[in-house]
Image (tube, coloured by chain):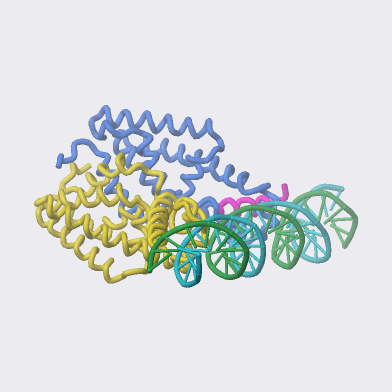
Chain colours: A blue, B yellow, C cyan, D green
Amino acid sequence: MRADARRNRDKILEAAREVVAERGTDVPMELIARRAGVGVGTLYRRFADRSVLLAALAEQYVYELMDALDHAVAAEPDAWTAVRAFVAHSVEKSRGAIAAALAGTSAPEARQALVDRIDELVRQAQADGAMRPDVGTDDLMEVLNVFACHPGVVPARFLPLILDGLRSSPPSS
Amino acid sequence: MRADARRNRDKILEAAREVVAERGTDVPMELIARRAGVGVGTLYRRFADRSVLLAALAEQYVYELMDALDHAVAAEPDAWTAVRAFVAHSVEKSRGAIAAALAGTSAPEARQALVDRIDELVRQAQADGAMRPDVGTDDLMEVLNVFACHPGVVPARFLPLILDGLRSSPPSS
DNA sequence: CCTAAGCGGAATGATGTCCTCCACTTCTAT
DNA sequence: ATAGAAGTGGAGGACATCATTCCGCTTAGG
C-alpha cells in the first residue's frame, strides 16, 4: 500500500469518527469524504461500502474503549471511581461512535469482552456499596448510548447528574 | 363540517401523535394516514402540509402539558413531588411529541407560559431544599427532550435514576 | 333522492444518496 | 529519469423515498 494511500485511509477514518459522532451513522458518505479532504471515489476505494467503514470504526472504538477501561482501573483503586472515570472519558471522547461500536453488528466477540469487563467492575462497585444494586451494566450501556445518539446534550452538564443518580443510597423521596 | 370528516380529523391527530412519538417528526405522511385508517388525500384535505399538522399537534400538547402541570400542583403540596409527578406523567404520556411541542416553532406564547410555570415550580422545589440548586428548568427540559427524542429508552427504568440525580445533597463522591 | 362534501390512492415530480467509472495525477522501484 | 502501477477526484447513472396533487367514486344528511 502506497504511503499516500495509507495517509488518506487514516484521514477518512478520523473524519468518519467526527462526522458520525456529530450526525449519526447514516450520514451521507460524501460528507465524510469532504471532511477527510478526499473525493468519494477514494473513500469507496478503501471501504467497499458504508457498512465496511462502520465496521472498521466500530472495531477501532471497541479497542479504544477497552484501553480506556484498563487505564481507569489501573489509575483508580476504587471500583466506582473507575466506573465514573471510564464513563466520563468514553462519553467525552467518542460520542456518537459509541453507538456504532456497541450497538453495531461488527466485532461481536471483542465487544462482548468489553461488556464483560465493564460488568465485572460494576459488580465490584455494587459490592463496595457505592453503586445502586438495582441498576446493572445494561443500564450503564444504555446511558452511554443515549449520550451517543443524542448529540444535542452537553455531556459535561448532564453526566454528573446521571452518575449521581446511579450512586447508592440517595435520599428517598 | 360533516360528522365523518370531524371523526377522521380526530383519528388523524391521534395517529400522528402515536407515530410521531414512535419515529420522530419527519415520519412519512403516508404512515400517519395509514395508521389513522385514511388515505393520504384525506390527510392533506385537513392539514395543508406537514408543518400545519405538526403545529396542530404541538398546540394540543402544550395545552395538555399545562393541564398535567396544574393537576400535579393541585394534587401535591410539595413542589419537588409535583415536579416528579409532572415529569413522569409527561414522559410516559407523550414521548416524542414533547419535542414537537417544546422545540417546534408553533404556539410560542403558550409554550412560553408553560415553561414559565414549570420554572416557578422548580424554583420552589429548590427553595425547599429538595432539588439541586445547580440545575434549572432548562436542564429539566433537556431531560424531557432526550426522552422525547430517544424512543429506545424505557422511561420507567431511567426516569427514577435521572430524577434521583436532580435531587439535593446526594452523597458526594 | 340529490348534491355538496368527502374519500382513497395511483400518479407525478422533487430530492437526496449510493456507488461506479474513467481520465488524470502521483508515487516509487529500478 | 522514467515507466507504469497505484491512487485520485468528482460527475453522473440508477435508484429509493417522499410530499403533494388530482380525479373518479362514495356517502352523509337535508
User: Is residue A2 magenta-colored?
Assistant: yes
* Residue A130 higher or lower than B8, as above or below: above
At horizontal 18% and vertical 42% (from top left) the residue drawn is: B171
Residue A119, percent across and down? Answer: 38, 30
Q: How many marks?
A: 0
Residue A120, percent across and down? Answer: 37, 28
The residue closer to the viewer here, A78 or A116, is A116
Residue C3 is left or right of residue B130, and the answer is: right
Residue A15 can be seen, yes or no: no
At horizontal 29% and vertical 57% (from top left) the residue drawn is: B141
The residue closer to the viewer here, B98 or B7, is B7
* Residue A129 higher or lower than B163, as above or below: above
Residue D28 is left or right of residue B171, and the answer is: right
Residue A112 can be seen, yes or no: yes
Quadrant housing residue B140: bottom left
In terms of secondary structure, what is the magenta stretch mainly?
A: helix
* Residue A172 higher or lower than A43, as above or below: above
Q: Quadrant of the N terminus of chain B?
A: bottom left
At horizontal 50% and vertical 42% (from top left) the residue drawn is: A101
The residue closer to the viewer here, B51 or A159, is B51
The magenta segment is A1-16
